[in-house]
Amino acid sequence: MAEVFLARHGRTAYNHERRFQGQLPVALDEVGRQQAQALAEQAGRHGFGALWSSPLRRARETADAVSARIGLEPREDARLMETDAGDWTDRTFVDVQAEAPAEFERFVALDPTFAFPRGESFAAQKLRVEAALADVREGPLPALVVCHGVVIRLAIYGLQANGSAPPRIENATLVPLGD
Protein backbone atom coordinates (compact mmCIF):
# COMPACT_ATOMS: atom_id res chain seq x y z
CA MET A 1 0.00 0.00 0.00
CA ALA A 2 1.20 3.53 -0.79
CA GLU A 3 2.53 5.61 2.07
CA VAL A 4 1.89 8.96 0.38
CA PHE A 5 -1.30 9.99 -1.38
CA LEU A 6 -1.73 13.13 -3.43
CA ALA A 7 -5.06 14.88 -3.92
CA ARG A 8 -5.89 17.69 -6.29
CA HIS A 9 -7.93 20.52 -4.82
CA GLY A 10 -11.63 20.87 -5.62
CA ARG A 11 -12.84 22.76 -8.67
CA THR A 12 -12.56 26.54 -9.01
CA ALA A 13 -14.22 28.89 -11.47
CA TYR A 14 -10.82 29.09 -13.19
CA ASN A 15 -10.79 25.30 -13.65
CA HIS A 16 -14.30 25.43 -15.06
CA GLU A 17 -13.35 28.27 -17.45
CA ARG A 18 -10.04 26.55 -18.37
CA ARG A 19 -8.06 29.57 -17.25
CA PHE A 20 -4.50 29.68 -15.87
CA GLN A 21 -4.69 30.40 -12.15
CA GLY A 22 -1.02 29.82 -11.35
CA GLN A 23 -0.39 31.02 -7.81
CA LEU A 24 -3.44 33.31 -7.56
CA PRO A 25 -5.53 32.93 -4.37
CA VAL A 26 -8.54 31.46 -6.20
CA ALA A 27 -11.33 30.00 -4.03
CA LEU A 28 -13.28 26.81 -4.63
CA ASP A 29 -16.61 27.20 -6.39
CA GLU A 30 -19.76 25.40 -5.21
CA VAL A 31 -18.88 22.24 -7.15
CA GLY A 32 -15.38 22.40 -5.68
CA ARG A 33 -16.73 22.63 -2.13
CA GLN A 34 -18.86 19.54 -2.77
CA GLN A 35 -15.84 17.75 -4.25
CA ALA A 36 -13.78 18.68 -1.18
CA GLN A 37 -16.43 17.11 1.07
CA ALA A 38 -16.45 13.94 -1.02
CA LEU A 39 -12.64 13.81 -0.88
CA ALA A 40 -12.83 14.24 2.90
CA GLU A 41 -15.13 11.22 3.16
CA GLN A 42 -12.78 9.16 1.01
CA ALA A 43 -9.77 10.29 3.08
CA GLY A 44 -11.57 9.23 6.23
CA ARG A 45 -11.23 5.60 5.16
CA HIS A 46 -7.41 5.68 4.93
CA GLY A 47 -6.20 6.29 8.48
CA PHE A 48 -3.81 9.07 7.51
CA GLY A 49 -1.13 10.03 10.03
CA ALA A 50 -0.35 13.41 8.44
CA LEU A 51 -2.07 15.99 6.27
CA TRP A 52 -0.04 18.37 4.12
CA SER A 53 -1.26 21.21 1.91
CA SER A 54 -0.19 23.81 -0.57
CA PRO A 55 -0.88 27.22 1.00
CA LEU A 56 -2.83 28.40 -2.06
CA ARG A 57 -6.45 29.11 -1.16
CA ARG A 58 -8.05 26.41 -3.30
CA ALA A 59 -5.81 23.69 -1.86
CA ARG A 60 -6.10 24.96 1.70
CA GLU A 61 -9.93 25.07 1.48
CA THR A 62 -9.87 21.46 0.29
CA ALA A 63 -7.42 20.46 3.03
CA ASP A 64 -9.59 22.18 5.64
CA ALA A 65 -12.57 20.05 4.57
CA VAL A 66 -10.42 16.93 4.88
CA SER A 67 -9.07 18.16 8.23
CA ALA A 68 -12.57 18.50 9.64
CA ARG A 69 -13.27 14.87 8.71
CA ILE A 70 -9.99 13.21 9.76
CA GLY A 71 -8.95 15.43 12.68
CA LEU A 72 -5.47 16.35 11.47
CA GLU A 73 -4.28 19.94 11.10
CA PRO A 74 -2.93 20.62 7.59
CA ARG A 75 0.78 21.40 7.45
CA GLU A 76 1.36 24.01 4.73
CA ASP A 77 4.40 23.81 2.49
CA ALA A 78 4.95 26.44 -0.22
CA ARG A 79 6.96 23.94 -2.27
CA LEU A 80 3.63 22.19 -3.01
CA MET A 81 2.18 25.25 -4.79
CA GLU A 82 1.13 25.23 -8.41
CA THR A 83 3.54 26.51 -11.05
CA ASP A 84 3.96 30.27 -11.28
CA ALA A 85 2.27 30.81 -14.66
CA GLY A 86 3.91 34.20 -15.19
CA ASP A 87 2.39 36.12 -18.11
CA TRP A 88 -0.16 33.37 -18.72
CA THR A 89 -1.77 33.90 -15.30
CA ASP A 90 -5.46 34.78 -15.57
CA ARG A 91 -5.57 33.97 -19.31
CA THR A 92 -7.73 31.27 -20.88
CA PHE A 93 -6.20 28.13 -22.36
CA VAL A 94 -7.96 28.91 -25.65
CA ASP A 95 -6.37 32.37 -25.90
CA VAL A 96 -2.88 31.14 -25.05
CA GLN A 97 -3.17 28.18 -27.42
CA ALA A 98 -4.23 30.50 -30.26
CA GLU A 99 -1.41 32.97 -29.55
CA ALA A 100 1.41 30.51 -28.79
CA PRO A 101 0.44 27.02 -30.01
CA ALA A 102 3.93 25.48 -29.83
CA GLU A 103 4.54 26.77 -26.31
CA PHE A 104 1.07 25.64 -25.24
CA GLU A 105 1.79 22.10 -26.50
CA ARG A 106 5.05 22.09 -24.53
CA PHE A 107 3.04 23.11 -21.44
CA VAL A 108 0.52 20.29 -21.97
CA ALA A 109 3.27 17.69 -22.48
CA LEU A 110 5.25 18.72 -19.34
CA ASP A 111 8.21 19.36 -21.63
CA PRO A 112 11.36 19.57 -19.47
CA THR A 113 12.49 22.70 -21.33
CA PHE A 114 9.21 24.58 -20.84
CA ALA A 115 9.00 27.68 -18.66
CA PHE A 116 6.06 30.04 -18.43
CA PRO A 117 6.92 33.45 -19.92
CA ARG A 118 8.23 35.47 -16.94
CA GLY A 119 7.18 32.57 -14.71
CA GLU A 120 8.49 29.26 -13.44
CA SER A 121 9.92 26.34 -15.35
CA PHE A 122 8.67 22.79 -14.90
CA ALA A 123 12.26 21.76 -14.12
CA ALA A 124 12.41 24.20 -11.17
CA GLN A 125 8.96 23.17 -9.97
CA LYS A 126 9.89 19.49 -10.14
CA LEU A 127 12.89 20.08 -7.87
CA ARG A 128 10.82 21.86 -5.23
CA VAL A 129 8.06 19.24 -5.37
CA GLU A 130 10.59 16.40 -4.98
CA ALA A 131 12.13 18.14 -1.95
CA ALA A 132 8.71 18.64 -0.35
CA LEU A 133 7.72 15.01 -0.91
CA ALA A 134 11.02 13.83 0.59
CA ASP A 135 10.09 15.76 3.75
CA VAL A 136 6.57 14.31 3.70
CA ARG A 137 8.07 10.79 3.61
CA GLU A 138 10.20 11.63 6.67
CA GLY A 139 7.12 12.43 8.76
CA PRO A 140 4.18 10.36 9.97
CA LEU A 141 2.80 7.96 7.35
CA PRO A 142 0.54 7.35 5.60
CA ALA A 143 0.31 10.99 4.55
CA LEU A 144 -2.14 12.91 2.40
CA VAL A 145 -0.88 15.89 0.39
CA VAL A 146 -3.52 18.29 -0.97
CA CYS A 147 -2.01 20.16 -3.90
CA HIS A 148 -2.43 20.88 -7.61
CA GLY A 149 -2.71 19.10 -10.94
CA VAL A 150 0.77 19.87 -12.26
CA VAL A 151 2.32 19.03 -8.88
CA ILE A 152 0.72 15.58 -9.04
CA ARG A 153 1.64 15.04 -12.70
CA LEU A 154 5.26 15.97 -11.99
CA ALA A 155 5.39 13.69 -8.94
CA ILE A 156 3.95 10.71 -10.82
CA TYR A 157 5.12 11.09 -14.40
CA GLY A 158 8.07 13.45 -14.17
CA LEU A 159 9.04 15.61 -17.10
CA GLN A 160 8.11 14.30 -20.54
CA ALA A 161 11.07 14.43 -22.91
CA ASN A 162 9.17 12.37 -25.49
CA GLY A 163 6.45 14.98 -26.06
CA SER A 164 3.61 12.76 -24.88
CA ALA A 165 1.26 14.32 -22.38
CA PRO A 166 0.69 12.49 -19.10
CA PRO A 167 -2.96 12.15 -18.11
CA ARG A 168 -4.74 15.14 -16.63
CA ILE A 169 -5.61 14.82 -12.94
CA GLU A 170 -9.26 15.59 -12.22
CA ASN A 171 -10.24 17.85 -9.33
CA ALA A 172 -10.52 16.22 -5.90
CA THR A 173 -8.95 12.97 -7.11
CA LEU A 174 -7.00 10.90 -4.58
CA VAL A 175 -3.87 9.40 -6.17
CA PRO A 176 -1.47 6.95 -4.49
CA LEU A 177 2.16 7.87 -5.03
CA GLY A 178 4.40 4.93 -5.84
CA ASP A 179 7.90 4.71 -4.43
Image: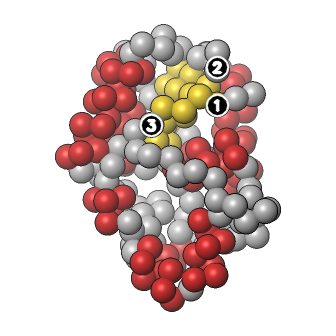
In this view, 80 is above or below 111: above
105 with respect to 157 (left or right): left
User: Quadrant location of the C terminus?
Assistant: top right
User: Quadrant location of the N terminus?
Assistant: top right
The image shows residue 100 at horizontal and vertical percentages of 56, 85
Assign a secondary structure to mark 3. loop
Kind of residue at badge 1: Leu
Determine which quarter of the picture holds residue 163. Answer: bottom right
The image shows residue 9 at horizontal and vertical percentages of 41, 43
Kind of residue at badge 3: Thr
Assign a secondary structure to mark 2. loop
Q: Which residue carries the number 1 mark?
A: 177
Q: Contact, CB < 8 Å: mark 1 with mark 2?
A: yes
Determine which quarter of the picture holds residue 108. Answer: bottom right
- As measured in the structure, the alpha-carbon distance from the residue carrying label 2 to the one carrying label 3 is 16 Å
Q: Nearer the viewer, residue 103 or 143?
A: 103
Q: Which residue carries the number 2 mark?
A: 3
**Residue depicted at 57% across the width and 83% down the height:** 101
Disc 3 residue crowd, few under 14, some 14–19, many 20+, Cα 10 Å: some
Q: Which residue carries the number 3 mark?
A: 173
